[in-house]
Image (cartoon, grey):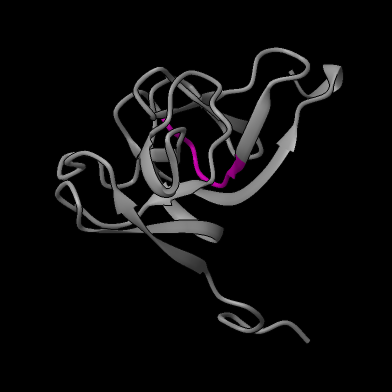
Amino acid sequence: MATEGGGLGPFDISMEATATLATKQYFAVIADSSNPHKCVIAGANGKVIGILQNKPAAGETAIVRTGGVSKHSMGEASMTPGDLVTATADGDGEQVDAAGEFFYGILLTNADDGDIASILVTQGVAHASDA
């Protein structure tokens, strides 16, 4: 029998913030190309490793949710539960709209541009039927 809160909880990792991310809590992050132990905000359709959980300054520890449920800043209107989530140019989430796009989450709530929504953090590549 399933119980609320049972099983594995969220999975977070620590990375160093390359730049100040004080205004980017709940945005998607990628590993810095010059140092994979540091993170930066994701760009459009980036290979996201997770969602930033805190507000670190440059050089401080960034807490990155790489699995489980997370809040996430959304950058597209009229999204619905079950939509696959990929990154905008600013690290917000938007719906996958093409086969072969990398996704890093499944939307769990309705969302519009500017909302903080809930997603299940999981990675994959969209198929034609997903777009």
- Say which of 96 and 50 sits in front: 50
How many discs appear? 0
Is residue 107 located in the magenta-colored stretch of the structure?
yes
**Placement of the C terminus among the 4 image quadrants:** top right
x 63%, y 22%: residue: 96
Residue 5 quadrant:
bottom right
Is residue 116 located in the magenta-colored stretch of the structure?
no
- Check the image and report above or below for 34 versus 44: below
x, y percentage for residue 79? 52, 27
- Say which of 80 and 120 sits in front: 120
In the image, farthest residue toward the top: 98
The stretch of residues the image draws in magenta is 105-111
- Check the image and report above or below for 88 versus 121: above
Residue 105 quadrant:
top right
- Say which of 82 and 126 sits in front: 126
In the image, farthest residue toward the front: 34
x, y percentage for residue 99? 78, 15
- Say which of 35 and 113 sits in front: 35
x, y percentage for residue 4? 58, 80
- Check the image and report above or below for 10 versus 63: below
x, y percentage for residue 128? 84, 16
- Check the image and report above or below for 67 versus 121: below
x 20%, y 57%: residue: 60
Specify whether 17 is left or right of 128: left
**Placement of the N terminus among the 4 image quadrants:** bottom right
